[in-house]
Image: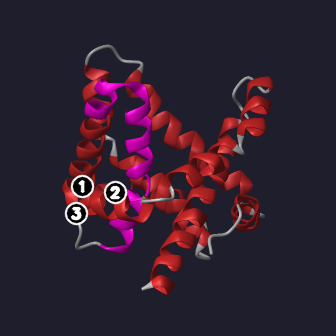
Amino acid sequence: MLKENSVLRLEARNALSQQWLVAALAALVFSAVLGVPASIPFAGTIVCILVLPINYGFAVLFLKRLRGEELNIGSLFDGFNDYGRILGTALLQAVYTFLWSLLLVIPGIVKSYSYAMTNYILLDEPELRYDAAIEKSMKLMAGNKMKLFLLDLSFIGWALLCVLTFGIGLFWLKPYVSTAHAAFYEDIKNNLQVAA
């Protein structure tokens, strides 16, 4: 039986307790690494692609925190230690999502939810790469995409508060959402093991 989204959010808040400032700083660094290159015409797009492994780092940083490790901002750059595997998988995800989006916006969104667990799988199963990791995510998310969508939707109030703070609140919201996603991953993975 999967946990209620309110329980996943509570687990995320508990994991981030006493760590909110470091989490916000990690979100700031993450945003700067992706945002600064994006502001550079032409070359910025290439740089953004080259630094895609930071998405992996941001995801696993909060999965590790959920598992009891101290937040270490250096973990944001863990994806660069296995650069080819992490970048190659991220590029495939982006291409697949883009191609599905060409059909209509909704299929692209649905597929992005299918691929949502890929970064966690790359951490837990280092032998998997590229399509294998993406396909494992698709299996985990079969029947669970709507649940993750509803979890994301449950943060809408927090997102509105971020607008009132001129976006500053996003540096706290992003870690909260990411940790809740990590709790979601742990939950569906554990349920799959029990079912097996």
Q: For mark 2, does the 10 Å Cα neighbourhood hold few (<14), some (14 to 19), or many (20 or more) residues?
A: many
Of tags 2 and 3, the one toward the viewer is 3
Q: On the rendered image, what quadrant is the N terminus found in? A: bottom right
> Magenta span: helix, strand or loop, mainly?
helix
Q: For mark 1, does the 10 Å Cα neighbourhood hold few (<14), some (14 to 19), or many (20 or more) residues?
A: some
Q: Residue drawn at (32%, 65%), measured in percent from left and top?
A: 136
Q: Residue at the top extreme?
A: 41
SS state under label 2? helix
Quadrant of res 45: top left
Magenta range = 98-125
Magenta span includes 122: yes
Mark 3 = which residue? Answer: 132
Foreground residue, 143 or 133? Answer: 143
Disc marking residue 102: none
Along the polypeptide, which appears first: circle 1 or circle 3?
Answer: 1
Disc marking residue 83: 1
Q: For mark 3, does the 10 Å Cα neighbourhood hold few (<14), some (14 to 19), or many (20 or more) residues?
A: some
